[in-house]
Image: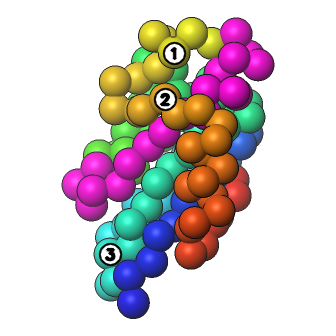
Amino acid sequence: MKRDVVVLLTRAPYGRVHVAEGLRAARGVAAGFDRHDVTVVYTEDAAFAARAAVDRERLTMTDHIVDLHEENGTMVADRRALDARNIDPAEIATDIAVRDGDAIAELVRTADHTLDF
C-alpha cells in the first residue's frame, strides 16, 4: 500500500553520515515495491547540506538524490532552519524547494510515516 513518507534530515553534513544515510533510506523507500511518495526535509543543522555550494560527491549524496528524483521524490528546506543559521534561501540548490515552518509541520503531520536522521 502506497504511503506518504517524510525523511527528516537534522544533522550537520560534514563529519557525519546522517545526511547521506537519510538520503539513501529515502531513495530506497521511494523505489521499493510500493513506490511510496517521499519528501526529504532539510531542517535543523542539515540546512547546511541544502546549499548549492555543498560538495554532494564528497558527502556521497549525488547518486541518492538522482535516484530519489527518478522515483518522483521531492526535497524541501525548512525556511526557519535557514533563518536560524543565516542561510539565504538564494543559496539553496535549485532542486530543493524552500518552505516555511508551517508547511513543514503540515508535511510531518499528514505523513503516514516519518524517518529521522
- Closest to the observer: 22 or 15? 22
Specify whether residue 36 is in view.
yes
Quadrant location of the N terminus?
bottom left
Q: Tell me which segment is drawn in magenta.
A: 68-86
Between marks 3 and 1, how big is the CA–CA gap? 30 Å
> Which tag, 2 or 3, sits closer to the chain's start?
3
Q: Position of residue 52 (x, y in %)?
A: 43, 18
- Disc 1 secondary structure class: helix
Residue 65: image quadrant is top left
> Looking at the image, do the residues carrying marks 2 and 1 touch, with CB atoms under 8 Å apart?
yes
Residue type at mark 3 is: Arg
Q: Residue 74's spot in the image, x, y percent?
A: 38, 48
Give residue 35's mark. 3
Q: Is residue 25 above or below residue 88?
A: below
How packed mark 3 is, by other alpha carbons closer than 10 Å (few <14, some 14-19, many 20 or more), is some
| Disc 2, SS | strand
Q: Amino acid at mark 1?
A: Pro
Q: Which mark is residue 42?
A: none
Left or right, 69 with reference to 110: left
Residue drawn where x is 34% and y is 24% of the image = 94
Report x, y in % for residue 113: 60, 72
Mark 1 = which residue?
89
Please report the residue visible at 63 percent of the width from the left and 58 percent of the height from the top: 108
Q: Earlier in the sequence, mark 3 or mark 1?
A: 3
Residue 96: give x, y in percent of width and height.
Answer: 41, 33
The residue at which mark 2 appears reads as 98
